[in-house]
Amino acid sequence: MSNSSYYGDLTGYEPISEVDRKEFHEQGFLLLRNVLTEEHRAALETAVDRVYAEEVAAGNDKNGTVHLLGFLNRDELFGELLTHPKVLPYMWGLAGWNIYSHHNHLDVTPPAKEPEKPYWGWHQDGYRQNSDPETMDPNLPRPMFSLKIAYVLSDLSENGRGATKVIPGSHLKNSLPRPADLSVHNPDPEGTVEITANPGDAFIFDRRQWHSRSTNLSTITRKMLFVGYTYRWIRHLDAIDFDPNGEWYANRTPVQRQLLGEAPHSANYWGINWDGYVDDEIPLRKELKTRGLLDRNIPWLR
Ligand SMILES: O=C(O)CCC(=O)C(=O)O
Ligand SMILES: [Fe+2]
């Protein structure tokens, strides 16, 4: 079932504006308004509610909170989100064509039943990507390596509803001072912004952005879908449990399959030999090339 009505005439190959590109590079995140039509948002919420009920029934919740990794194959609509035409241009525009989703999660966060114990949730994503790469200069920002789109399905327009907090511009800082005593409640770092957003909005963030979850102190259950994209030469983070012979995978387009990690290695899986322009058959690059969207001046779009 294709739901092209949710996407209008967009193809996913409309380049992003220079204003957005600059803001993303300066701030480390971008809030995109009205990415989902109300009809699309509501359909996604129905799918999320179904998956939530399945996870709770299986005992995979923590006091009613579900944080489900690798959710894309749980609904046709989730698979289509991989190439949402309002979002895809940010992924190839900011990270290039050699990408896939190594990590994605569905989050349902009901109102907190009691005050949470003190916690310090501030982190950069990427785990060992923050330690392994050899950069002798601690002031040299590490590479981005991945970015994430977060789709907002519930109303996060007011503070205190469990929204993600970020420190704009912090993606270029390799460290964030930690309070001395983490057993007490500490104030958020200077410059913290809670990403308040309306249902149907989305935000993109650089994995280096210092960010934190927050406690849902409201009466509204928070519902979010996060889809991370990284380079094809970086390994999956989530277990891949979709059936490659099943209907859901059969319904995916060549670009969606690339974005699901098709190809066991990052070189010339799509069929050309060791020399020559092996990249030309990589689905996302092929789409960009056909449309004249490769750009020799932007390394990740060469
Ligand atoms: O749940 C949140 O708001 C934060 C999630 C997070 O840290 C992430 O998606 O990387
Ligand atoms: Fe994170």
Image (cartoon, rainbow, N blue to C red):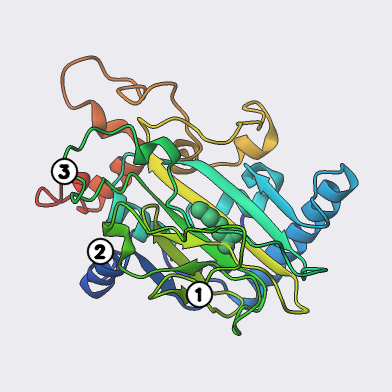
Q: Where is residue 118? Give x, y as percent.
A: 65, 62
Whole-number angstrom distance, CA of label 3 to CA of label 1: 32 Å
Q: Earlier in the sequence, mark 3 or mark 1?
A: 3
Q: Residue furthest left?
A: 297
What residue lies at 73% left-to-right and 58% top-to-bottom? 48
Q: Which residue is mark 3?
A: 137
Q: Disc 2 vs disc 3: which is toward the camera?
A: 3
At label 3, the amino acid type is: Asp
Whole-number angstrom distance, CA of label 2 to CA of label 3: 21 Å
Q: Which residue is mark 2?
A: 25
Is 43 or 132 nearer to us in this picture? 132
What residue lies at 69% left-to-right and 69% top-to-bottom? 222
SS label for mark 3: loop
What residue lies at 44% left-to-right and 40% top-to-bottom? 127
Q: Earlier in the sequence, mark 2 or mark 1?
A: 2
Q: Residue furthest front?
A: 180
Q: Disc 3 vs disc 1: which is toward the camera?
A: 3
What residue lies at 51% left-to-right and 37% top-to-bottom? 260
Q: Is mark 2 within 8 Å of ligand 1?
A: no
Q: Which residue is mark 1?
A: 195
Asked whether the residues under the numbered discs 3 and 1 touch, taking CB atoms below 8 Å apart as contact, a structural biologist would say no
Quarter of the figure that contains the C terminus: top left
